[in-house]
Amino acid sequence: MKKFRNIAIIALATSLLFSCVGCKNDEDDDSSSTIDKNHLAQITESDGYFVKSGASEYKILIPATTDTLIDFAVSELNYFLENTSGTTLPVVTDDTVTEASSGKYISIGETSIVVGENLVEWKKDLGNDGYVVKTVDDDVILLGGSSYGSLYSTYEFIERNLKAKVYAVDEIVFTPSKNIKLLNMDIREVPDIARRAISSYHITNNSTYRRRMRFMLHTENWTYWTHSHFAFIPKETYYEKHRDWYSPDAEATQLCLTNEEMTAEMIKNVIAFLEENPNEEIVTLGQQDDNSFCECSNCAPQVLKYKESGVMVRFVNKVANAVQAHFDEKGEGRKIQFATYAYQKTQVPPVDDNGNVLDPSVYPANNVSIIIAPLTACYSHPINNADCNAIAKQTFEGWQKVNATIYARFYSAQYAYYFVPFVQYGNMAKNYEITDEYGAEYIFDTAVGESRTSGFQDLLAYLQSELMWNYSQNVRDLIDDFMKAYYKDAYEPMKELLELQEMYFAKLENDGEHNLCFIPSANKGGNYFFENTIFTKEYLRQQELIIEEALNKIAPLKQTDNALYQKLKNRIDAEKTSYIYWQLTFWKDYFTKEQIAQKIDEFESICNAIGIDRWAEYNAAAGADKSIATLVADWRTKLL
């Protein structure tokens, strides 16, 4: 296999032409380039064909030893190729290919094309998810820093060379052609945010879509993602015999993190869990979801010295060091990362008012990361805005002082009222960039994961995917691209609806008495959305008229392409639920009983058809039952 072993690395061009970042499918120019430290690309059209007259000379080459992600990359490449050109490629492995049988290959992963002395250079600085895509003679190299990166490189090739683009779980734009020229590609992509996750409904529940959008499930290879202390030291097991392991308040709401016996048991239990779960890579040791901290005679003086956050870090460091030492002794090379929350009592970092670190022991260990979850942050302003987000700014900067590896958890929904639209797109890219500058290696941006809802949720997931990968992209261009692909004939009115919501809430923020910022938590200010002065009759009627126009735009499709009509209607109807909800909540007296009954029936029908089954997060506002079924039943009882 001399052809494979002697292929030299083609260095990335040091001087690339400037172009708009993120422009991957330029219909007017077959060459494109981007310039950015993480996003480098030089692409020109070649004379050769990848597919000609509906057939291809290419084979997919994969390593002799493969894994589920490489196998999935193969199936995805053939899926997109078949839907574009009508053909698929045979698959061969390194151990079955000889020099005599060499041909044209799409190489995925660490195949013989890159194995050897060049492999380290090919993978240098790619991290886990970064990748290279290179055309070398007649071959195409798709190689990532890991199998995740190799999968993502396959999607890059699909988007560039096949001109196929994923916008939503049920919206992929293909460019059918029986003749596809092979591009000359020299691409290096490293995501701006190393690990990315969101909780959008389809991302959470559809693994194929999640991979296509280059996300990991936030719990993937991650033990007890959130509040985990009682999971490892359950009260029902230990409390009666070891009351001093828990905080002395009446409900024993937290662990006592200075208790050495409890710490030893925690170490033992974490090790046992990891031994039973060999694929877990990250363990969260997070306090219970209660704004409390142990105030026993051992903890109180340490809190005065180190703050609650310092006591937390010292505890987690002990556990992390002991657990890693156990696996180091086994000699298996297994590395465990730990995470803990800067949340409620532990949000304030262990530094003094001048930013000085309180004690060397409060520096997180190398294998301990800090999850910053700014519950009171406003998303109408950048996360480091000194006026509106002073607490979040101080939190990030303080943890940066102790050299913490930062994980960030953001919130992109109003959890007390899902029908309040999240329209803070202008700050999304900026917040990702700011968080990256703080050194964040991971962002989990939570939206609504438990239900479908209104508020352009598929657009939100698309923007989160694109901007976590490359936050230098133009947000307005991304929105426009998505709206055209997703709403098609209804593009113009649906874009008008989105812009109306953006402008309306921006005006309220600037002019309103409440300093109307978007704060996701109801008990931290979000309740001011629940007012008829916000959702006025006039504003809701504007939305109603725009949606009527959108439905009129797609009406001809009912006769020519009913399946497409129904899909687009469902997408438009999803946004209709928002104004119906607020009309029936605040303005029921302006409708007749017949009109109210019609609106309730329509609301229920849309929710059932689309899968909207909740109007708020569980316990996010007064009362526990936030189901659409109960809401509709209450409306029928009280309004009719």
Image: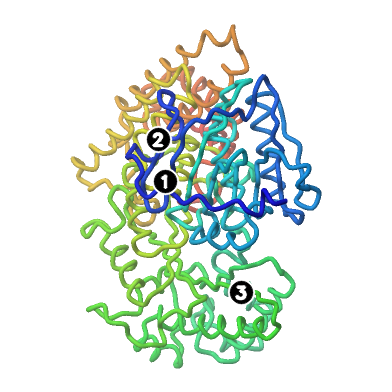
- On the image, the x and y values in percent for residue 471 come to 38, 48
Q: Secondary structure at mark 2?
A: helix
Query: Of the residues under marks 2 and 3, which one precedes in the sequence?
Result: 3
Local packing at callout 3 (Cα closer than 10 Å; few below 14, some 14-19, many 20+) is some
Local packing at callout 1 (Cα closer than 10 Å; few below 14, some 14-19, many 20+) is many
- On the image, the x and y values in percent for residue 560 come to 59, 8
**Three-letter residue code for mark 1:** Leu
**Three-letter residue code for mark 2:** Leu
444 or 25: nearer the eye? 25
Does the residue at mark 2 contact the one at mark 1 (Cβ under 8 Å)? yes
Residue 478 badge: 2
Q: Is residue 527 visible?
A: no
Q: Secondary structure at mark 3?
A: loop
129 or 463: nearer the eye? 129
Q: Which residue is mark 3?
A: 335
Does the residue at mark 2 contact the one at mark 3 (Cβ under 8 Å)? no
Query: Of the residues under marks 2 and 1, which one precedes in the sequence?
Result: 1
Name which residue lies at 62% across and 30% down: 50
Query: Of the residues under marks 1 and 3, which one precedes in the sequence?
Result: 3
Residue 467 badge: 1
